[in-house]
Image (spheres, rainbow, N blue to C red):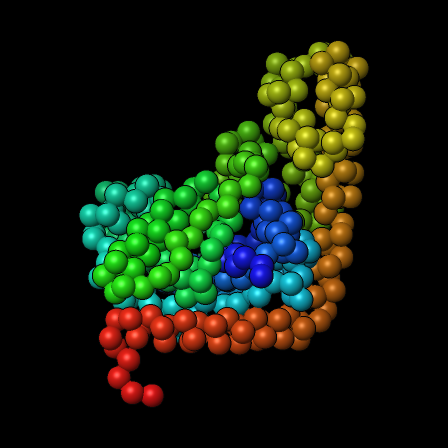
Amino acid sequence: MKKRVLTGIRPTGNLHLGHYFGTVQNWVNLQDEYDMYIEIADVQALTDNFDNPEKIRKNVNELTLDLLSVGLEPSKVTIFIQSMIPEIAELTIYYSNLVTMARLYRNPTVKTEIAQKKAIFGNNGESVTYGFVGYPVSQAADITCFKGECIPVGDDQLPLIEQTREIVRKFNSIYNFNMTEPNALTGKNSRIKGLDGNEKMGKSLGNAIYLVDDENTINKKIMSALTDTKKIKANDPANPEVCMVYYYHKLVNKDNLGTVCKECKSGSRGCVNCKKELINKMNEFLNPFREKRKYYENNMNEVYKIFQSGTNKAKNEASENIKEIKHAMKIDYYE
Ligand code: TRP
């Protein structure tokens, strides 16, 4: 039997190269080997977007189109919408007794995010909501509601998996149960830097290349990418290691990397030509995604069917599992 993979993603915007090389490419590789569930985490997205429901609604579709465009196949993966499975919310309530407030506040992911979101949660986090502080509990419900065994996530999510493991151990010991402790599956992939050289690619940083960017946008973005600032003239030798154009050549132009590097160092390659080559390679890389996306955009009914069948399957699974859980908690009264 294939092992169960459960992962989730918040529908807050389109996927960019950071998402792709950081996590989503890994999901595509796992889909043959594992029984894979992918949750569109709309409820979790609302924890810090509660006042912007249109944004989340719109991005459920956008994100799903992105996921299908990179080659996740509906015949292999179960894609479902979190809010359509009330069992997850129910389980969150049961688990909330097993976690202290102090432990949640100490969770490194939560702590960092509260500090980053001053605009919503106040300078010292004084306006942070109950729902936001508690989202690791709901993530534990996401995972265990479907008996997730392997959780493919980026490094930033490890404290959340650890929190889930603690909840599982506590649940098992109190209610004499045998829930599986999930393990994180971290790929070899790392974080992708932004066009400006920032360590992180992100929407709020304005330095991202999106999978949906058209040729014109790719052209503009790559033309303005950070290069070696010490290089003044086209034939000055430069250092590729401080150049973002070379950095992206490493992602999409592996075959010609040796030449790019050598010519950059020797000064025989001007930045404009180097950028043009990258633009071509980036477009070649994005073209298959664009084509798949176009197909699904023109066949939205198919996308809705994918949601429906994935969500139905997930719902059946969740309602079976929660029965056992409620039995263990002695809150199964009558059928
Ligand atoms: N917290 C994850 C993120 O922000 C998304 C997520 C929601 C998730 N539920 C999950 C990840 C369950 C793994 C398992 O990226």
The N terminus - image quarter: bottom right
On the image, the x and y values in percent for residue 248 come to 66, 33
Give the residue drawn at x 25%, y 65%.
175
The quarter of the displayed image where residue 321 is located: bottom left
Residue 88 percent location from the top left of the image: 38, 68
Q: Is residue 147 above or below residue 230?
A: below
| Quadrant for the C terminus in the image | bottom left
Q: Position of residue 262 (x, y in %)?
A: 75, 16
Between 91 and 106, the one nearer to me in the picture = 91
Q: Residue at x 72, y 47 (%)?
A: 286
**Going by the image, does 170 lie left or right of 298?**
left
Residue sitting at x 65%, y 63%: 76
Nearer to me, 31 or 259? 31
The structure residue drawn at horizontal position 67% and vertical position 66%, both measured from the top left corner, is 75
Tell me if 323 is positioned left or right of 330 in this view: right
- The image quarter containing residue 208 is top right
Q: Could you tell me if residue 132 is visible in this image?
A: no
Considering every residue shown, the one lying at the far bottom of the view is 335
- Based on the displayed image, in which of its 4 quarters is residue 67 positioned? bottom right
Q: Position of residue 36 (x, y in %)?
A: 56, 60
The vertical placement of 91 against 47, above or below, is below
Looking at the rendering, the quadrant in which ligand 1 lies is bottom left
Question: Does residue 274 show up?
Answer: yes
Q: Nearer the viewer, residue 217 or 26?
A: 26
In this rendering, the count of numbered labels is 0
Camera-nearest residue between 232 and 39: 39
Q: Is residue 260 above or below residue 10?
A: above
